[in-house]
Amino acid sequence: MSAETTVERRAVVAPPPHITSPATCSGIMLWVVIALAPAALWACVSMGVPAIRMFALSVGSTLATEAVWNVIARKPQTLKDGSALVTGVVLAMSMPPMTPWWIAVAAGFIAIALGKMLFGGLGFNLFNPALVGRAFVLVSWAGVMASAPGRGWFKTLDVAATSGYDAITGATRLAVAAADRAAGGVYGFDLAAQYQPLLWRNLEGSLGEISAALLILGGVVLLAKGIIDWRIPVGYIGTMGLLSWAFGSDPIFNILAGGVLLGAFFMATDYVSSPMTRNGRLAFGVGCGMLNAVGRFYGSMPEATTFAILFMNGLAPLLDRVFKPRVFGWVKRNG
Amino acid sequence: MRTICVCLVLYISRSIGSTWLQGVVDLGKGAFKGGIHPPDRKAATAGCPVQWAPVPARLVLPMSQHLGAPCVPTVEKGQHVGRGEVIGSVDALVSAPVHSPVDGEVTAIGPWLTTGGTRVTAVTITPDAEQDLESYVRVQADDARAIVRAAGIVGMGGATFPTMVKLMPSADTPVDTVILNGCECEPFLTCDHRLMLEMPEKVVEGARKITEIVGASRAVICLEDNKPDAVEALRRVAGDGVEVRALPTHYPQGAEKQLIWAILRKEVSHGKLPATTGALVHNVATAAAIADAIDTGRPLMERVVTVTGNVARPGNYRVLLGTLVSDLLEYAGGTVGEVGRVIAGGPMTGPALASLDVPVAKGTSGIVVLPLKDAAPRVEDDQPCIRCGRCSESCPMFLLPYAIGNYAARGDWNGAGRFNPLDCIECGCCSFVCPTNRPLVQLIRLAKAAAMLKGVKP
């Protein structure tokens, strides 16, 4: 009975299923980082030390905050689930590269402490931690964050203008477009001419605005790996484009500029703070796009993406209730 | 690109009329929503012809190898019984008698552990030295239904519901389509595959007999398209009135409600019997047993069992009911390597054995010695839900497993009950896909039990 003795010593009794998919939490988080890597690395190459400094500060701050929190709260260490790393990278990409170091550290601390750990850690937070951190510093140090061009931003934008002006100077293409719109188009800012720099190399704005093409590449990787649901980015970007067109602007420019792509592929798709039902996700994406477009064209702050997603985060549980799927077999036909 | 490929395959298959390609084209018709694609691990035994396992030193026959009323032993200790003789029965509709698979002597009657982990009364038989497995006591009964009943036939896919009861459709739910389930969507198992490949005429004959008994108009034998050889074998002998359908390989295609949906595009309504859709689903092994019983009076005394995983000689064995798993594993050369679990049936739904001294019963389709490296992490090692939604995407019943699980984990049974736990078919897809290893099926089972206690009707 050699079979019996060897088996009975080692085998375990457990409920089925006895096999599991290879997907793990840290594996998923790692893929998010991999998907962000092309844009992040390109930002580091293009901007140099300021970008590298931002990533180091932000990621260092989120990781340290989570580690220290777990030690103080006497909880098992959770760094290896990878979510703090993702928060740190996403947060850095949403910040201007010349942001003072202490603001970056504060954003990382708030993101993890207030955005995640206070709620009970990964899985329990209502809002996207990175956006909580970003919103906190935006509102707290509005003067510093939205300071004159040249302070927070890597460089300011100078483009040749038409109709009597020599050049337009602004913080970002989005800001120039807004100013031009507000002035009734007197600057003649050519939105279509901005596609190429926005797609490939855009040094104005946050780190994540470096290249729309690389962000789309990352988003496609996540979609292909089945890590994110297409409903959120498609709903988001589609609505953004449609409403931009309805508001009389260039839809492609409005999708490529600002935080829309970073938000649609990497922030709104955060599992914990987005709905879990299929239709809920679509509604969530559409809601993000609507709020973002309205905020961009009619709001007083340029940070429409941040607050659009945060607002929809708050609605996510309600969307899940509204869009609860019909259970198989709950039909009137077949008797 | 994909559209072009599909069109191309369609065009080629239509033009040359290839059976195999036709099977590929059939894919599009069969899918259901949700489900998973676990690694199938069938290669180790798919090529192993069915061979007899030896008569062991003793057989232990539980009196409850079926759903419903347990049988009462009709023999006494010390009594000599013949192969095919009834050793346990009970006068209840939902039940199935138990027969002795050998000539031998009853040496004990008492409680014995089963594969499901319960202790039931069992009759232990010590076989005679000389055995003639070709002869047996024939089942005597008047009509086909009575023969099926007397032969002790139950659902052999694992559900073990007494087959005769399913052959009595009520007048208000007539059966139109008989569906034979040869999907075998569980990883590792190949017993139904080999049966269909080696005895296709018997399976088809079973389909005809069931169709006749219930007065249906057609029969459909369903397989997953990972068994093209069995599809071909069945199609060769199918003939009129029996259709062979290759469905996409997709777990849980063999679940009754998903199978009916794939074939008829009808949903079995909540709380209703599958017969309300006009379909009657039987496992292919059950159908073969029905054909045997009616044609030759053979009671259910043995079945094909896939023994696979970390064993020295994996294969498909025709095993006498009551053979202990330890004897069967020893015949298969014993276990090798590091063993995670020993499972009766497939790894998605089968119970893990607490002891190897449990008998093979009518519903035991396989003994899977799961390698340690393939075994799921311990259920205690779960992490909080990260709300990724994979569970609800994979649920073939469109449930929200995370919601039921999160409420159940807190003991909030009212909250869990709002998310229809009683509709869960316990296929295990949600637990399988969960990246944080939440024991979702187990939590849903708790929620089900709580709902039943409250008197909610399933």
Image (tube, helix red, strand yellow):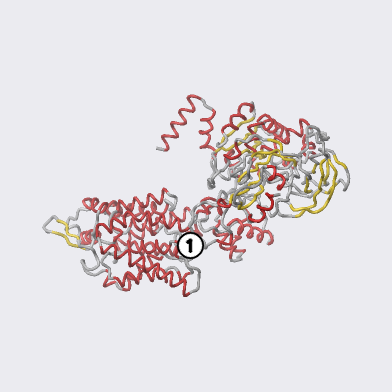
Toward which corner of the image does residue B303 lie, by quadrant? top right
The crowd level at tag 1 (other Cα within 10 Å; few <14, some 14-19, many 20+) is some
All told, the count of numbered labels is: 1
Q: Where is residue A46 in the image (x, y as percent from the top left)?
A: 24, 57
Q: Quadrant of the C terminus of chain B?
A: bottom right
What SS does tag 1 mark? helix
Q: Residue at x 73, y 35 (%)?
A: B290
Chain letter, disc 1 residue: A
Toward which corner of the image does residue A32 lie, by quadrant? bottom left
Q: Where is residue B358 in the image (x, y as percent from the top left)?
A: 73, 50
Observer able to see residue B173: yes
Q: In which quarter of the image is the N terminus of chain B?
A: top left
Q: Position of residue B92 (x, y in %)?
A: 81, 47
In the rendered view, does B356 fall on the left or right side of A257?
right
Q: Name the residue under label 1.
A: A317
Looking at the image, residue A138 lies above or below residue B219: below
Q: Nearer the viewer, residue A140 or A91?
A: A91
In the rendered view, does B250 fall on the left or right side of B165?
left
Q: Position of residue A296 (x, y in %)?
A: 30, 61
Q: Residue at x 49, y 27 (%)?
A: B14
